[in-house]
Image (tube, rainbow, N blue to C red):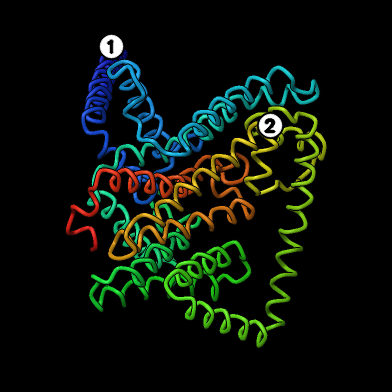
Amino acid sequence: MAFLIGYKGLIGLAVIGGVAAISALVFAYAYTEYVVMALILTTTIIAPPIPRDVTTTLVLLLLLTLIWLSRLLLVERSFQSIRPAPPNRYVVLFGIIVVISFIWSQLYVDPHIAYLQNSKLMPRIVTAIVMILSPVAMLLFGNFLNTIHQIRWIIWFYIGYGAIAIIPKFLDFSVPMNFNLGGQLPVWVSIFAMGQVLFNERLLRWQRLVLLGIVGGWTYVQFFMGREWISGWAPLFLGLGIVVMLRSRAAFVVLVIIAVAYLIADQDVLARLIEEESTISGETRLEAGNLAIDIANGHFLFGTGPTGYYFYMAYILKDWFQLSHNNYVDIYAQLGIFGFITWIAMWVSIGWLIWQTYRRLPKNGFVGGLTVSLFACFWVTLVLMMLGDWVIPFTYTQTMRGLSYTVWPWLWAGLAIALMHLWRQNKLSADPSQST
C-alpha cells in the first residue's frame, strides 16, 4: 500500500512538473524578450548552485537558444529576422568548429589519454555547450532587446546590484550562494557608472555623487584591499582610464601623472606586488601556457577538444599542475588553429561593431554614457582574456559556474547590436527620454 501511495505520488509530481515545464516553455516563447532580459537576473541574484556545476544561466541560455532556433526554422522558415551585425557569421562558424573539434578529439586522441578523456565525457559535453552558447548570448541580447527602456533597465539594475555588492566586501560577511559576486563585477559596474557620471548630463548632482561613490568603493576594494591581485585592479584602472580619456584628455593626463607619482613614491610595494604575481601566478601560468601550446601543436588543426589539453597535462605531469588561465591559449589548445582564427575574427568584428556604435550614436545622455562604457569594456575584455579565463570558463579552473560571470562581456557586446538596431530604426532620437 505504501508503495502504491508513493508511486502515485511520484506520478503526480511528474505530471505537475510536466505541466510547469510546458507552461514555462509557452511563456518563454510568447515573451522571449523579457526572458532574455532575465539573463541579467540569473547572472546576479538568481544563481543558485545546481548539481554538476550547471547554472540557471546555462539552463536559460539553452532554453532561449532552442526557442529561437525553433522559431527561425519551424515558424519563420528563414533567418531574415536576425538583426545584421558583423559578429553573426563568426558566432555560427565558431559553434560549428566547437562541434568538429569535439568529434575530432574523440577520433584522434592519444591512446594513453583515451581512458581519462572518456571518463570525463559529461564535463566535455557541458564545456562544448558553454563554448557555443556564450557567443549566442550576445546574439540573444542583440536581437531581443527592442527598446531603450529595456537596455536602460538592465544597466541601472546592474549598477545598483554592484552598489549593494560592495557592502559584504567592507563588512566582511558571506552572502548566500545564489548571489553572484564573482568575476569582474567591480570592473563592469565601475565602467558603466563612470560612463554615466561623465557623459549623462541629465543626472542630478546627488546621482553623480552616488555613482562616484560606487566607483570609489570598488576602487578601494580592488586596489587598496586586494593589491596582490593584479587581475582585479589593472583592468579596473584601464577601463576607467579609457572612459576618462574619451571625456577629457587633460583629465586623463592628470590621472596618469597622479598614478606615476604614486608608483614612484611607493616603489617597494610595487616591486613586491610584481614579484609576488610573477612567482605565484605569472611564471607558473607562463609555463602552463607554453606546455598547453606544445600539446596543441600536435593537434593544431582542431585542437584537443573541449577541456582536452587538461587530460594531456594530467598524463604528462601526473601530480599537481597549473593551467594556463588564458582564454587565448585555451581556445587554441582546445579548438586548434581554425578555432583560434575564428575566435580572433569574432572579436575583431565585435570591436568593429562597438566602434561603429561609439562613432554614430549620441555622445550625451544615457546612450552616450553607455556607448563610451561599451567601448571601454571591449578593450578591457581583450586584456582580461590574457589574465584569465574571464570570457569562456575553463571547466577545471572557473568550473561551469563561472559562466554566470564570464557571460557578461558577451551581453555587453549584445547591447551594442541592440543599440545599432535602434539607431537604424530611428528609435533613439525618437525617444525623448533616452538621455536619462
Whichever of callouts 2 and 1 sits on the residue coming sooner in the sequence is 1
Q: Amino acid at mark 1?
A: Leu
Quarter of the rendering occupied by the N terminus: top left
Identify the image quadrant of residue 6.
top left
Q: Position of residue 370 (x, y in %)?
A: 36, 59
**Left or right: 124 as drawn, with respect to 92:** right
Circles 2 and 1: CB atoms closer than 8 Å: no
Relative placement, left or right, of 305 versus 321 is left
Position in image of residue 294 (x %, y %): 80, 39
Residue at 61%, 65% in the rendered image? 229
In depth, the one of 152 and 111 nearer the eye is 152
Looking at the image, the residue that sits furthest to the bottom is 265
- Judge left or right: residue 404 versus residue 9: right
Q: Is residue 311 left or right of residue 188?
A: right
Q: Position of residue 105 (x, y in %)?
A: 69, 23
Q: Residues within 10 Å of mark 1 (few under 14, many from 20)?
A: few
Residue 231 sits in quarter:
bottom right
The percent position of residue 309, horizontal first and vertical second, equals: 71, 35
Asked if residue 171 shows in the view, the reply is: no
Identify the residue at image location x=70%, y=47%: 324
Which type of secondary structure does the marked residue at label 1 adopt?
Answer: helix
Q: Is residue 287 visible?
A: yes
Query: Element type at marker 2?
Result: helix
Label 2 belongs to which residue? 308
| 236 vs 125: above or below | below
For the C terminus, the image quarter is bottom left
Q: Residue 306 versus residue 94: which sits nearer the camera?
A: 94
Label 2 and label 1: CA atoms lie apart by: 47 Å
Which labelled disc corresponds to residue 4?
1
